[in-house]
Image (cartoon, rainbow, N blue to C red):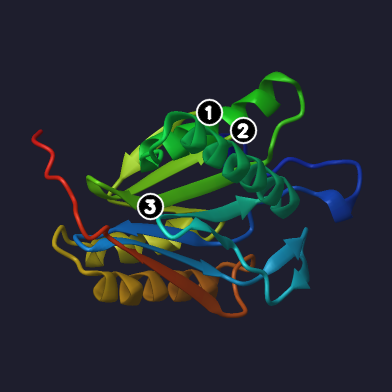
Amino acid sequence: MTYFQQYGSINSLSSYTTIRDMTTIVGIKTKEGVVLGSDKRASKGFFIGSKITQKIAKVDDTLAVAIAGQLSDAEYLIKVAKAERQLMELRRGFPLTTKESARLIANLAYSGLKNYQPYFVELLVAGVDQEGGHVYAADMSGAITSEDFASSGSGSPIAYGVLESMYFKEITNEQAEAVATKAVAAAMERDPGSGNGIEVLAIPNLLATVEVKK
């Protein structure tokens, strides 16, 4: 169970700084890579602050992060993680896997919580490496979970209904883009925190992948 699912929204001193995960983001693992989807509405409490917010941040050609929660916290966290990721890759001479990148982001989020300056975010970290596509859910608790598909934000209960009914193991990127679009669109119909358009990003597998025996 994630932080927001357990505790709901966290109220601050001002209605303009009320922290809510009023959004819908989805991530889908496919046989060809990964797909992320989101709506474009940014809310300040129950006021629509922006209708063109980009909630999917592309770290590089192999990794992207979908954002739910406080946008400023998420943007800062992703910028720091991007810099740390590049530094680690330079030091060791080869790229981080998707799981290592997700763990890096989750550790940074957890360090804020331990210092009593938490990042009020839930993130879907999706990317490809030599083993194929991966989708991880991460939040301020520092935990990461690997999922075939995942959703977060206030519209996620509605989006999960679409994902559960339409996902299958051999889904392609093109099919997953359609599913992600339908999932976010369904959430936008009933969730007041989601709306104003849909953004979808697909990341294809690397040309050479290694089959991992389980």
Between disc 2 and disc 1, whose residue precedes? Answer: 2
Quarter residue 112 falls in: top right
Number of marks: 3
| Residue ID for mark 2 | 109
Q: Quadrant of the C terminus?
A: top left
- Left or right of 137 in this view: 43: right
148, 207: nearer the viewer = 207
- Left or right of 187 in this view: 82: right
Badge 3 element: strand
Disc 2 residue type (three-letter) = Ala
Please report contact status of discs 2 and 1: CB closer than 8 Å, yes or no. Answer: yes
- Left or right of 162 in this view: 153: right
Question: Residue drawn at (58%, 54%), measured in percent from left and top?
Answer: 67
Question: Residue drawn at (50%, 60%), measured in percent from left and top?
Answer: 25
How far apart are labels 2 and 1 at the CA level? 6 Å
- Left or right of 206 in this view: 60: right
Badge 1 element: loop
| Residue ID for mark 1 | 142
| Residue ID for mark 3 | 127
Between disc 1 and disc 3, whose residue precedes? Answer: 3
Q: Disc number at residue 39?
A: none
Closer mark to the observer between disc 1 and disc 3? 3
Could you tell me residue 141's position as x and y percent?
Answer: 56, 28
Badge 3 crowding class, 10 Å Cα cut-off, few under 14, some 14 to 19, many 20 or more, is: many
Could you tell me residue 162's position as x and y percent?
Answer: 33, 66
Could you tell me residue 204's position as x and y percent?
Answer: 30, 64
Disc 1 residue type (three-letter) = Gly
Badge 2 element: helix
Question: Residue drawn at (36%, 48%), measured in percent from left and top?
Answer: 135
